[in-house]
Amino acid sequence: MPDGLTVFDGEIAALANLDRALLDALRQAAADAAGDGVEFIVNSGWRSPEYQDELLREAISEYGSEEEAARWVATASTSPHVSGEAVDIGEFDATSWLSEHGAGYGLCQIYDNEPWHYELRPDAVEQGCPVPYTDPTEDPRMQQ
């Protein structure tokens, strides 16, 4: 991904292949955050299964085991990035803004150990975001 990619750069596959509702929520939140002087930089969005597999292999090498790598990187068959349902937002000010305001757009931090990882939870607009999992190993979706 190019450096400095914003949620408005839709011609890049990492954004163009995101779930439309997620991208729309991100763009609305980013437009509102801009009024507070905050810009949403995207570090990762949609990923191909091949790229996800590469990230997992690198994580296993870095962390020494599949079990430890699973705390940080999902398999291609379970990753919400591969399905276009997750985005990683860079810059502390943006993740801080989303921590405070994201639920109003349905944008929720899913994992405590990944404050940059956001997914769309439409019910959060009315009910607030669910309590984050400690890490992906607690997420039932990762147990497939």
Image (cartoon, rainbow, N blue to C red):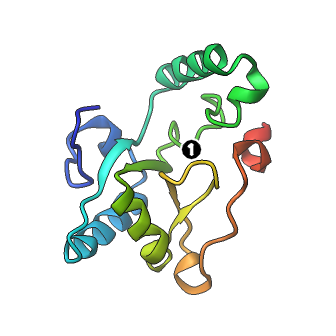
Residue pointed to by mark 1: 80
Residue for point 53% across, 72% down: 122
Residue 130 seen by the camera: yes
Q: Quadrant of residue 58?
A: top right
Residue drawn at x 23%, y 44% as measured from the top left: 5
Q: Is residue 6 left or right of residue 122?
A: left
Residue 132 in the figure: left or right of residue 1: right
Q: Residue at x 56, y 44 (%)?
A: 80
Task: Bin the neighbour count of mark 1 within 10 Å (Cα to Cα): few under 14, some 14-19, many 20 and up.
Answer: many
- Rendering coords of residue 6 (x, y %): 23, 50
Q: Give residue 53's quadrant in the image.
A: top right
Q: Position of residue 98 (x, y in %)?
A: 43, 68
| Visible residue check, residue 105 | no
Residue nearer the viewer, 83 or 104: 104
Residue 67 appears left or right of 46: right
Q: SS of the residue at dot 1?
A: loop
**Looking at the picture, how far across and down is residue 117, in whole percent?**
51, 51
**58 vs 122, nearest the viewer:** 58
81 relative position to 59: left or right? left
Q: On the rendered image, what quadrant is the C terminus found in? A: top right
Q: Amino acid at mark 1?
A: Pro
Relative to 9, is 52 above or below?
above
At a point 74% along the width and 28% down the height, the residue shown is 68
x and y percentages locating residue 92 in the rendered image? 38, 56
Quadrant in which the N terminus appears:
top left
Numbered-mark total: 1
Q: Is residue 62 above or below residue 141?
A: above
- Give the answer, above or below, for where 46 lies relative to 66: below
